[in-house]
Amino acid sequence: MKIKACGVKEKGARPEPFYYEKEVGRNDALVKITHCSIARGDIQFMNDDWGDTNFPVVTGHEIVGVVEEIGANVTDLQVGDRVGIGYQQEACFECEFCRAGNEQFCPHQKVIAVNCYGGLAEHIITDNRFVFKLPANLDSAKATPLMSSGLTVYTAITKANLKHNAMVGVLGVGGLGLLAIQFLKKMGHTVSAFSHSPGKKEMIEQAGATYVDSSNEHDVSQLHKQFDFILSTLNVGFNIDTYLKLLKPQGKLGLVASPLQKQSISIGLLYDYAQRTIYGNYVGSRKDMMDMLAFSAKHNVECLVEIMPFADMDKAIEILKSQNVPARLILENPL
C-alpha cells in the first residue's frame, strides 16, 4: 500500500509530503497513527547529528494508534486495538541477544530513521511483536512519550537494582527527566532533580522531587557522597566528575542521553575508596516495554504534553529549535 508521510530528503531540510510503498506481511500490523511525538532527537535525526540517518527519513519514534489490519500469523492483536510503537521495529529473534530476551541489542534490528520509516505519517506497518497494546487507563497523548523516553529511563532505573528507599538524583528535567522522577518516586525512592533552570522548581516539586540548582557549585558540592544512583538525561556536555563525587561507594551513574561532544572523567573517582559504576542504557526489551506500560498504568505515570495538530508540524519544529520546552510536543491525527 502507499503510505502518506512527511519526509526529510537531505540533511537539514524541512519535512515535506512523502509517499512510500509497504505491504502488510504475515507478521505485521497496519496501524493508523493518531498521536506521534516530535522531540529534540527527531530534529537531530533530520540534521544527521549522529551520522547514521538514512535519507529520505521519516522521523517520529513515539507512536500511538489503532490497528487497522493484521497479517496471517498475528494472534496477539486485533483490528481496533489501541497500541503503542517505539523506536525499534524489527529483530531477528534468532541471535544470542534475541534468544536471551534482549531484542534491543539484536545486530539485525531495524530502528526508525536509520533502517525504516517512523511515525510522522498517516499509517505505519510494523512487525506485530513491536506493537504493544496500551492499558485502558492510559491517555493516548500522555502515553505517547512512554514508548521511547519512558522505556529508556524505566529500563535504566530497573537495571540499577536499587535498594528500598534509595537516595537518587536525576540530571536534566525535560521529557526524560520528568518521567524518571515519576518512576523513581512511585518505586519508593527519595529523588533530587538537578536543573540550571529555577523556573522548573515548582514543576519538579509537584512531581515529588527536591530541586537542586545545578549552576550553584556550592549547593551541588554539599551533596558529596549522598546518592546511591544518579540518572543523567542530559544531551549536552556536563562535568561527569562533579556527579561521580556525589555518589556513595558502590553508587551508580546511569546515562540515557548522549552529548554530541566527547566527555572526560577522572578514572580514579570510579575505584578510589569507591567501586562506583557508570553504565549506559539503550531503549529496552519487549518485556521491559510491557513491564513499563503495566507499571505506568498502575501508578498513573504520564508525560507532560502539549498537543498540536499534525498540520502544525513545522511550528512544532521551530518551537523545539528555539525553546527549552519541558512538555513533549504531541502531533495529533484525528481518526
Image (cartoon, grey):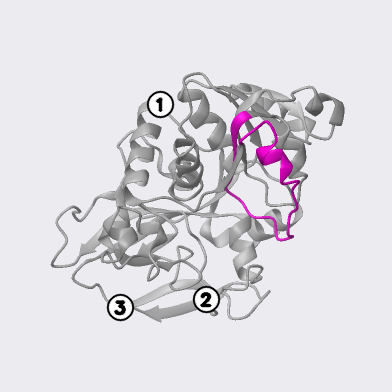
Cβ atoms under marks 2 and 1 closer than 8 Å: no
Q: Earlier in the sequence, mark 2 or mark 3?
A: 3
| Residue bearing the label numbered 1 | 299
Task: Mark 2: give few (<14), some (14-19) or many (20+) Cα within 10 Å.
Answer: few
Single out the mark in the foreground, 1 or 3: 1
> How far apart are labels 2 and 1 at the CA level?
39 Å
Residue type at tag 1: His
Q: Earlier in the sequence, mark 2 or mark 1?
A: 2
Task: Mark 1: give few (<14), some (14-19) or many (20+) Cα within 10 Å.
Answer: few
> Magenta segment, which residues?
249-275
Name above or below for residue 166 compared with residue 269: above
Quadrant holding the N terminus: bottom left
* Residue at point 44%, 79% (across, down): 19
Checking the image for residue 1, the label placed there is: 3
List x then y, in percent, for residue 200. 72, 31
Single out the mark in the foreground, 2 or 1: 1
Checking the image for residue 17, the label placed there is: 2
Between 107 and 122, the one nearer to me in the picture: 107
Residue type at tag 3: Met
